[in-house]
Amino acid sequence: MEVHTSNGDPRAPAVTLKALEALFSGCDDFISRDLDFGLAGRLRLTACWLDGPVSGDQISEDVIRPLTSRLRAEEVFSETACLERIRSGGITRCSVRELRDPETAAEELCHGSCALLFPGLGTALCFEVRSSQTRSVSEPSLEKSLKGAKDSFTEALRVNTALIRQRLATPDLKLLNSQLGRESRTRVSLLYLNSRADPRVLTEVQRRLDALDPEALLATGPLEAALSDCPASPFPQLIHTERPDRFAMHLSQGRIGLLADGLPIGLILPVDLSEFMKVTGDSSTHFLVATQLSMLRWLALITGALLPGFYVAVARFHQEMIPTRLLLSIIEAERDVPFSTALEVLCMLLAFSLLQEAGLRMPNPIGDTVSIIGALIVGQAAVEASLVSPLAIIVVAVSGICCYTLPSQDLAFAVRLVRLLLVFGAILGGLYGMGLICCLVLLHLADLDSFGTNYTAPVSDGHPLGLLRLLIHLPQRRNGKRRRSDP
């Protein structure tokens, strides 16, 4: 049995039923029950818990039944002896905390504990009897796994840390717990490999977490704002993942991970732009195929960002760049359209974004239908009504499909924003305006850092083959040594 004792100030208020009832006034789920230790009537204790966060079966079997056992109450005539008997194993729970502060005891009750009060001592023993009725481990819904594991994080923190422990079964994996949120008291775990993580990064992460004091931590927004070097940047600076195998892979590479209770998402730092273009399944794919897919994703990134703006710039300012037959085809398609090319592209980008948002917000069967049928019917009707040209629809559709191929949706959102800026740059200055926007975006990326890691690495780390290392996946080397497992 693991015992934690809170050595608080002796002048602090005692943990009594009256103090807890005052803290939980107006809470109908607060339950208290008087119990006779051993049913002999010599000592009366009070058990308190919150209905819902705790398991009633565990309270009945592991707390109430041992307390009322006559054998356990033999030769116990004082609350001090009773406290020592229970703390040394009288109640069959693996973890027990001795508390003397009512507010700390109230926090334990909110996190799924049962408090056993000793009126004469002003002390409470808290036993964790948290309910196990949480969402079971299921397949990842956002990050599809072809050759990897089929499990994903859940809303239970200890389930998530157990999934990581299964993959990194070494004492070198360290786990630091803290609580964030004045109202939510959300438990956050900081995970890292002690032999590989950078101590300076770890110290800085802990400093920023200690300085974070939100009202409630119910989403990843406060964590992202506190751990991002440039929160105003649209480019993601933390990796979000729902897959424990990807989380463990980043830990093995020396990064630091964050898990929060109630959030089925893990956060990874520090990162660079190339990490958002990688897929966990690349390590399970032949290196030639992985290299081809990596190049395809980078090509999709560039195409998705530049294609609409390039089409607007060429159509408005640089018609001499278009081959004659293609130019004649564009003129024929645009002849009956009453709007300019720039307005066409902007309207189609807006329509594409609206359809995408509608597909995400609506229930899955209806959302898929709205996305497909809406795009087909609206696009076809717009072309037949001569409101937009077919080429504008093709350009916007290709750009949207390219953004869908990006592994990180956070990066895809940033690319869509850059795409819109490039279209405005093309409207104002053609290719020169696009070039100015591209230079500003590249300067912004070069200025970004993530805990000392350059955001544009490995291209900007001074290595002569940085671009090749970004695109090419080398074959894994064979390791002739193998550690024999214990019999």
Image (cartoon, rainbow, N blue to C red):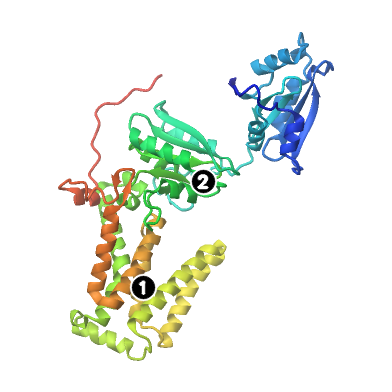
Q: Position of residue 315 (x, y in %)?
A: 27, 81
Q: Position of residue 152 (x, y in %)?
A: 49, 44
Residue drawn at x 76%, y 20% as measured from the top left: 120
Q: Position of residue 444 (x, y in %)?
A: 29, 57
Q: Which mark is residue 379?
A: none
Query: Relative to residue 74, is residue 420 drawn left or right?
Result: left
Q: Position of residue 225 (x, y in %)?
A: 44, 50
Residue 197 appears in the figure:
no
Q: Which mark is residue 264?
A: 2
Report the residue that reaches farthest toward the front. Answer: 11
Mark 1: which amino acid?
Val
Residue 348 appears in the figure:
yes
Report the residue that reaches farthest toward the top. Answer: 75
Quarter residue 332 falls in: bottom left
Q: Nearer the viewer, residue 359 or 84?
A: 84
Q: Nearer the viewer, residue 281 or 154?
A: 154
Instruction: Identify the mark nearer the N-term, 1 or 2.
Output: 2
The residue that mark 1 highlights is 396
* Crowd band around label 2 with a 10 angstrom C-alpha radius: few (<14), some (14–19), many (20+): some
Secondary structure state at the residue bearing disc 2: loop
Position of the C terminus by quadrant: top left
Q: Disc 1 to disc 2, how far (Cα)? A: 34 Å
Mark 2: which amino acid?
Pro
| Label tally | 2
Residue drawn at x 48%, y 46% as measured from the top left: 265
In the depicted structure, whether residue 29 falls above or below residue 308: above
